Amino acid sequence: MEEIYADCPSFFHKPDNFAQLGGLFGKRQLAPVDSDILDLKIKLAQHALDLASKRHIECLKVTTTTRPSTTDIDECASQPCKNWATCKDGVNSYSCVCLSGYTGQTCATDIDECASQPCKNGATCYDGVNSYMCVCQPGYTGQTCTVDIDECASHPCKNGATCGDGVNSYSCVCPPGYTGQTCNIDIDECASQPCKNGATCKDGVNSYSCVCLSGYTGQTCAIEIDECASQPCKNGATCMDGVNFYSCVCLSGYTGQTCAKNCKLRVDVAFLVDESGTVGEAQFQKVLQFIHNMVNTSFNVSKDAVRVAMITFGTGYKVQFILRDTTNKTDVLNKIDAVAYQGGGTDTSLAIRLARVAFLNPLRPAGARKGIPQIAIVITDGLSDDPTETKKEAELAQKQGIEIFAIGIGNFTNYSELQAIASDPDDGHVYNVDDFTALMNIGDMVSRSICKGLHSASMLNEK
């Protein structure tokens, strides 16, 4: 039994006197109530005060009886545990059994699996529920990014190169002859132009080979072959080495490429040389070299033996030297070397007319001799400006007794026109070569034809 007094005088503190208060309530008894659901200190006291006021009672004593509760309150009913944790009820308490990855009294806290810094090598850690994920830096792999990716595993290096693995990289050590990141590029050993003198370079693996032009030899074709080494010149002649050719300076009375023939030739020779724009200065110089070698090796130039003249023609013509002015070989060779290139068209008919009318006409003062064979050697690289007129002039020259040799150079020469220009038979009088370098190979053939005296055998004494 618990007694509660609400500011009552001492009169009401006695049990006997409390009975009088019971009558004031109409002998009504207050039922016992559970102390945890009713605040008697407030409600009953207020009710008693109201009654005391009405019945002139100045204080109130309330007597209650408290009974112990027999029902355990379920603290888990309000679901205090979070994140799917299991709640265990106790007496005036509860406990939470957390799922993996959570912690705290109510399992409300997500455990940070990244706190222990599991991700290595600069990787970024992303926290999950009872898990974490590592985003690796390039070059690493594995759950915690501890594995260095082997960039060499895919065999990126080619051609037998050695692969060196790095972090997110690899390097290739190339074998000789290869280059590039993966050694897939064959080094062009020809890029440095090792082959000389116009040779063709063929690239290999860590090597090259040079295909030399005729007249050169050696690994890089830097060595000019000495065509005089085999001593081709005969009868005391002097050998002059050139590129892929040689020339022999014959002693007086000998002729031929090797000075092997004792040929006492008396003849007047006029060279008619095309200097048109299609020839070009470089090729024109090769023509002059051809004439120089032919005169030097085949003709015994003198007042009484061989006389030489030269006319160059393009759109017009130019007299370089006449028969009368050439009485020794040295003088003729110097004059040939001094000829300058002019350019222009290809007026072949004009050049033949000049030779016929002036230079190889004994009636003119140019130096042609009576009773001496007259030879015209026409050298051209293409079609004449007026083929009909050219043919006409050639026929007139031949009727006059001039023996004409026609030499065509290049791929655009009209062979029919060469035949029309040259004397008969064509064999021995018409020559056609692909380029100016090949001229050097026909000089001896022309000189032999002259030396044999195809037109005037009586002038030749061959031993």
Image: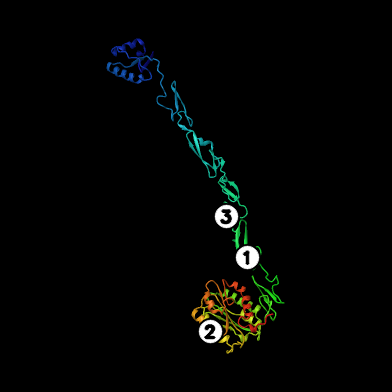
Q: Nearer the viewer, residue 342 or 61?
A: 342
Whether residue 430 is situated above or below residue 205 in the rendered picture? below
Residue 212 tag number: 1
The residue singled out by tag 3 in the image is: 185
Amino acid carrying mark 1 in the image: Cys
The residue singled out by tag 2 in the image is: 396
**Distance of mark 3 from mark 1, alpha carbons?**
27 Å
Amino acid carrying mark 3 in the image: Ile
Q: Position of residue 196 (x, y in %)?
A: 62, 65
Q: Position of residue 362 (x, y in %)?
A: 59, 88
Q: Is residue 349 left or right of residue 263?
A: left
Callout 3 environment at 10 Å: few (<14), some (14 to 19), or many (20+)?
some
**Distance of mark 2 from mark 3, alpha carbons?**
67 Å
Which tag, 2 or 1, sits closer to the chain's start?
A: 1
For the C terminus, the quadrant is bottom right
Check contact, mark 2 vs mark 3: CB within 8 A.
no
